[in-house]
Image: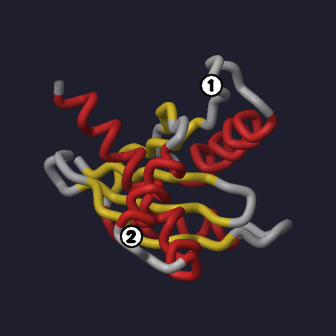
């Protein structure tokens, strides 16, 4: 069963897909969000159909004290749109500090700031999905 991982931001959505066995996550792409447009949802639906995705994991940004802030509320609202438009079940996975962890790895790998900006959302989605898969395997 293939699972999709999403790192939802205001401007971009990082997308990752699991392997057919649900063991590993691979970053697929970054989808650019255009305000007032449903092109991002169309692109996600296209990926779902291409890979035969059965479930979607969306990173839920929580505050360090485990509360939801404004961005968490936006992600929950967006997930409802995804679930109704794509017809796949959506689950949330705590994404606290995922982007920070990915950025730290990219900095240690001496990736330029410009290059980091182009891959960070996709890699954050991969990090979220891999963390979810690791938790499910235990």
Q: Which mark is residue 28?
A: 2
- x 47%, y 38%: residue: 89
Q: Which of the two marks, 1 or 2, is nearer to us in this view?
A: 1
- x 63%, y 30%: residue: 62
Q: Residue 87 location in percent, x, y?
A: 51, 47
- x 81%, y 36%: residue: 70
From the viewer's side, name the closer residue of 107 and 64: 107
Q: Quadrant of the C terminus?
A: top left
The local crowd at label 1, few if under 14, some if 14 to 19, many if 20 or more residues have their Cα within 10 Å, is few
From the viewer's side, name the closer residue of 52 and 32: 32
Helix, strand, or loop for circle 1? loop
Q: Residue 103 location in percent, x, y?
A: 49, 59
Describe residue 27's horizontal placement relative to residue 79 as left or right.
left
**From this viewpoint, which residue is outermost toward the right?**
36
Q: Is residue 60 above or below residue 104?
A: above
Q: Pointers 1 and 2 in contact (CB under 8 A)?
A: no
Disc nearer the start of the sequence (1/2): 2
How far is mark 1 from mark 2, CA to CA?
A: 28 Å
Describe residue 5's horizontal placement relative to residue 1 as left or right.
right
Helix, strand, or loop for circle 2? strand
Describe residue 29's horizontal placement relative to residue 132 as left or right.
right
Q: Residue 1 location in percent, x, y?
A: 23, 47
Write down the residue under mark 1: 64
The local crowd at label 2, few if under 14, some if 14 to 19, many if 20 or more residues have their Cα within 10 Å, is some
């Amino acid at each position: 069963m293939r699972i999709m991982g999403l790192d939802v931001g205001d401007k971009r959505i990082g997308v990752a897909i699991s392997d057919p066995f649900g063991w590993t996550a691979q970053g697929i792409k970054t989808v650019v969000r255009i305000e007032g447009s449903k092109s991002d949802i169309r692109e996600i639906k296209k990926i779902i159909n291409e890979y035969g995705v059965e479930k979607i994991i969306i990173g839920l940004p929580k505050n360090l004290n485990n509360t939801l802030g404004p961005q968490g509320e936006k992600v929950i609202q967006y997930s409802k749109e995804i679930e109704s438009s794509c017809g796949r079940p959506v689950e949330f996975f705590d994404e606290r500090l995922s982007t920070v962890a990915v950025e730290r790895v990219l900095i240690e790998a001496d990736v330029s700031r410009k290059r980091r900006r182009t891959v960070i959302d996709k890699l954050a989605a991969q990090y979220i999905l891999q963390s979810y898969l690791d938790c499910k395997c235990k």
